[in-house]
Amino acid sequence: MATTHGLDSISVGSLARSTGLSKSGILTVFGTREAIQVAAVAEARAIYLDAVVTPAWGHESGRPRLRALLDCWVAYLRAEIFPGGCFIVASTAEYGRREGAVADAVRALKREWLDLLESSLREAGVGDPAGDAFRIDAYLCAANVHRELFGSEKELDRARELALELIG
């Protein structure tokens, strides 16, 4: 729901309807709508780690791990784990300039991904880890947006190829 209608679409009522629980039961567990949304970000993070990061960590550090991260990211999108594409891309677009606990959770998730890319690039001995992490992230975000707008898979492969050129 968050990747197709935004995190703002997650409410006590929508969660009660989708789970079959009462609104009061939902409030007993979470307390507030904001807490539900923060929990949604945490769950999306766990899913992302399982789909993208953890499998890549089974590879040798450096370039092999970077290639695996890219392969896993493309597979994550192709598997359509989240309808509407990458949760990180969707939520950063929605919460980029906002304040509050949900925006903080979204920013922390995005920062964690960028830091992971940068440290992996540094381990690989790539010349400009911060700049190349930004470029790789830009390629992946653009591929996600193009895929969602135009329904084409080729942008995922193009983003991967461009990122691999940076890695060498």
Image (cartoon, rainbow, N blue to C red):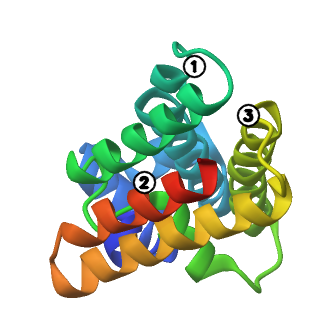
Asked if labels 1 and 3 touch by Cβ distance under 8 angstroms, the answer is no
| Gap between marks 2 and 1 measured at Cα | 40 Å
Instruction: Tell me how far mark 3 sits from mark 1, CA to CA.
Output: 14 Å
Q: Kindly indicate the quadrant of the structure image that contains residue 79.
A: top left
Dot 2 and dot 1 residues touching (CB under 8 Å): no
Q: Which residue is mark 3?
A: 124
Check disc 2 and give the amino acid type. Answer: Lys
Give x and y (percent) for residue 75: 29, 43
Task: Give left or right: position of 123 versus 70.
Answer: right
Q: Quadrant of the N terminus?
A: bottom left
Say if 114 sits above or below 99 in the image: above
User: What's the residue at 53%, 50% (across, down)?
Assistant: 40
Q: Position of residue 54 (x, y in %)?
A: 52, 22
Label 3 SS: loop
Choose mark 3 or mark 1, whichever is in front: 3
SS class, disc 1: loop
How many numbered marks does the figure carry? 3
Asked if residue 14 lies left or right of residue 20, the reply is right
Q: Which residue is mark 2?
A: 23
Give coordinates of residue 117: x percent, y percent.
70, 46
The picture places residue 43, in percent across and down from the top left corner, at: 52, 39
**In this rendering, position of residue 16 left or right of residue 61:** left
What whole-number distance in Å separates the C-alpha atoms at marks 3 and 2?
A: 50 Å
Which residue, given by chain and number where applicable, does mark 1 sit on? 57
